[in-house]
Each structure stands twice: as structure tokens, then as C-alpha cells.
């Protein structure tokens, strides 16, 4: 299975989730929970993170996290690594604590009227209700669940590293105790009816793979990725439509740079025809096949070739020619990739 791409850029907002290995409980007692909270605080101090929402459940956690600097990978590696070491040390055991890699989904923090940030915050805060720990038939208040940022709205002052103001702003509430109490009341009202906690539209938004956001925001992120110099190796297989979107964006960027390097037209309509720019197309085809996982069909359409079967012909032609191999190496350098 392909490893999900980690997308990092300044001021990115993420919905992060990780589970215990094999579904095991990773927060068995308050010592575990306090240890994780302390590490989250240290991570905010060390990596300058901004936490907007969090919740600890028995076998997993959720975070709504903002990274002013593009350091999500370094921070999560440090925090989860230190927690796992301590967790194992307490139990005198070895082995994995978390199940594979954590999941990180980019959250649109620009189109506020569309409520993406707000939807994720609600989803995180209402996790204990969906699990049947509070709300509904339990008759327990949501803010009685102390291992969640929801407990800091209207009941007690939040720690320095938890920024409650952004969530309140999303609901057009004042960033004071009055606004916090209003948000707490809103959450408690939602706890009454468990079936209404997350509607179909909310679930659709939250399951969009690599990004929770508008079409324009997703395009902006992909355009930003396409400007990066690093192109995934061809051994990176596709695991989902989300990964396909990202790989396509980077393949498009590479194709554009290669076309410009060879002095060719950029638009596919201007390239149409098997015999048009034949040698140049052969080189670009070989470049795309070597450094991207996009399909032959995509390459054929992008370069105006026609039938995808011609892609394999071009690849073999370049592979079997020492001169074309040298030209491919030169084109790769001009296109900002390494052979």
C-alpha cells in the first residue's frame, strides 16, 4: 500500500488522527492521558504549533492543529515517538504502540463561510458523545469529559497552547467567556440527539481523503505542490483518488517544465499528432514514466499523442538508445528532477 503524502506549508491546518496498534488501548489511565497532554504542550512550545481542538479516546486521538512553520512531520514524529517510548517503558514491553502512520488531512481555513474548520472542530469535540461516554442516555454533560478541548469552553480557562478563539470566531461568537459559554451550550444541545451529531453532508466533507475544503482551496494546494522540485518516484503506487490528484498535479508540473525546456507549446491542443515533435515527446514520455505514477492514458492525452499504446513504444525507444538516454538525463536536469 502506498504511504500517504505528507503535505507541509506555512500556516497549514490539519485534522490529525492516530489509533493504537491493532486497535489496542493507548490511553489506559490518567497517567497515560496526562503524559500525552504534557507532550502536546511541549510540542507547541518546541514547534510553535497552535492547537484548536483535541480529544483523547481509549484507542485513538484527534487533533485540529495549525503549523505556522512547515514542521508537521518533525513534530509528530517527536511527540508520538516520545509517547510510545514512555508507554512501553511503563509496561516493560517493546513493539509498536500506534497503528502505522498517523492520518493528516488538510483543512480549508480560508473559506470560512463554508464551515470546513467548524465541521472538523465539532467532529472532534463530539467524539465522546458518539462513543456513548457522555450525552444522550448517559445524562452526562459533554464538558464533564475532561480529556477534550470542549471542556475548556465556558467552564475553565484554557491552557496557553490551546487557542479557543478561532473556533469561536468560526461561529461568529465573541472571544470571551460569554462566547465560550454560548459555544458550550451549542455543543450540549447537539449531545441530546446522538443521531444528529454528524449529518450526511458533514460525513461527506470529512471523508474526502487528503483535504477537507472547497474546490478552489484544493486546487490552490495542488498548484503549490506542483511548484515543488521533488517529484514522487515511479515506485510510489496510487492508493486512492486523493493520492491520484496529488500525483497528477506534480506530473502536470513536470510535463510543463519539460515542454518549456524543449521550447515546445504548453497546451495539449497545440501538441496533437503522433508525428509532431516526435523525438521531444519520446523524451518527455520517458521522463514522466520514470518519475511519476500517472497512467499511459493521462500522458497520451497531455502530450496530444492519441492512443496510449504508443507510450510503451516511446519508452522502449529511449531506453534502447544511448544518445536518447543522454538527452533524457539532460532534460531531467533542466526539468528539476534527479536521475
Image: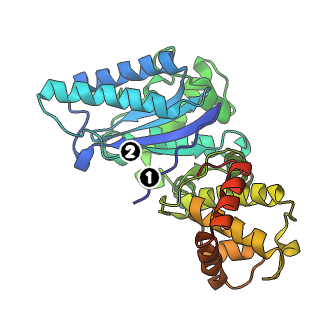
Per the image, label 2 sits on a secondary structure element best described as loop
| Position above or below: 191 against 316 | above
Number of numbered discs present?
2
Q: Residue at 49% x, 15% y: name it.
A: 45
Q: Which mark is residue 139?
A: none
Classed neighbour count for the residue bearing mark 1: other residues with Cα under 10 Å, few (<14), some (14–19), many (≥20): few
Q: Residue at 70% x, 67% y: name it.
A: 283
Return the residue nearer the eye: 338 or 160: 338
Q: Nearer the viewer, mark 2 or mark 1?
A: 1
Asked which quadrant contains residue 62, the reply is top left
| Position above or below: 115 against 31 | below
| Position above or below: 315 against 288 | below
Per the image, label 1 sits on a secondary structure element best described as loop
Return the residue nearer the eye: 205 or 158: 205
Task: Check contact, mark 2 vs mark 1: CB within 8 A.
Answer: yes
| Position above or below: 138 against 252 | above
Whole-percent x, y for residue 267 in the image: 85, 67
Which is more N-terminal, label 1 or label 2?
Answer: 1
**Could you give the CA–CA distance between mark 2 and mark 1, rounded to whole angstroms?**
8 Å
In the image, farthest residue toward the left = 92
Q: Residue under circle 1?
A: 3
Q: Residue at 56% x, 53% y: name it.
A: 232
Return the residue nearer the eye: 296 or 339: 339
Q: Residue under circle 2?
A: 101
Amino acid at each position: 500500500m502506498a504511504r500517504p503524502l505528507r503535505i507541509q506549508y506555512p500556516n497549514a491546518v490539519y485534522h490529525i488522527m492516530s489509533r493504537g496498534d491493532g486497535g489496542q488501548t493507548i490511553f489506559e489511565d490518567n497517567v497515560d492521558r496526562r503524559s500525552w497532554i504534557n507532550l502536546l504542550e511541549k510540542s507547541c512550545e518546541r514547534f510553535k504549533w497552535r492547537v484548536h481542538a483535541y480529544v483523547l479516546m481509549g484507542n485513538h486521538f484527534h487533533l485540529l492543529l495549525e503549523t505556522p512553520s512547515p514542521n508537521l512531520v518533525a513534530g509528530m514524529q517527536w511527540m508520538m515517538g516520545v509517547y510510545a517510548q514512555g508507554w512501553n517503558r511503563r509496561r516493560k514491553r517493546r513493539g509498536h504502540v500506534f497503528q502505522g502512520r498517523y492520518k493528516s488531512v488538510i483543512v480549508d481555513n480560508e473559506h470560512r463561510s463554508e464551515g470546513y474548520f467548524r465541521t472538523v472542530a465539532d467532529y472532534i469535540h463530539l467524539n465522546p458523545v458518539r462513543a456513548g461516554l457522555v450525552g444522550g442516555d448517559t445524562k452526562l454533560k459533554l464538558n464533564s469529559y475532561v480529556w477534550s478541548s470542549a471542556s475548556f469552553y465556558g467552564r475553565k480557562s484554557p491552557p496557553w497552547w490551546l487557542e479557543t478563539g478561532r473556533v469561536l470566531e468560526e461561529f461568529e461568537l465573541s472571544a470571551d467567556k460569554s462566547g465560550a459559554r454560548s459555544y458550550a451550550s451549542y455543543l450540549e444541545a447537539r449531545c441530546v440527539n446522538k443521531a444528529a451529531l454528524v449529518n450526511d453532508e458533514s460525513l461527506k466533507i470529512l471523508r474526502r481523503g487528503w483535504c477537507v475544503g472547497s474546490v478552489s482551496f484544493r486546487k490552490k494546494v495542488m498548484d503549490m505542490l506542483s511548484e515543488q522540485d521533488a517529484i514522487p518516484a515511479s515506485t510510489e503506487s496510487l492508493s486512492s483518488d486523493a493520492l491520484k490528484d496529488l500525483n497528477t498535479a506534480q506530473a502536470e508540473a513536470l510535463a510543463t517544465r519539460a515542454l518549456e525546456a524543449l521550447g515546445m507549446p504548453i497546451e495539449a491542443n497545440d501538441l496533437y499528432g503522433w508525428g509532431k515533435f516526435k523525438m521531444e515527446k519520446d523524451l518527455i514520455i520517458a521522463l514522466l514514466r520514470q518519475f511519476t505514477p500517472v497512467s499511459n492514458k493521462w500522458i497520451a492525452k497531455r502530450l496530444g499523442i492519441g492512443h496510449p499504446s504508443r507510450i510503451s513504444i516511446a519508452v522502449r525507444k529511449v531506453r534502447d538508445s544511448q544518445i536518447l538516454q543522454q538527452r533524457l538525463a539532460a532534460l531531467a536536469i533542466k526539468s528539476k528532477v534527479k536521475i
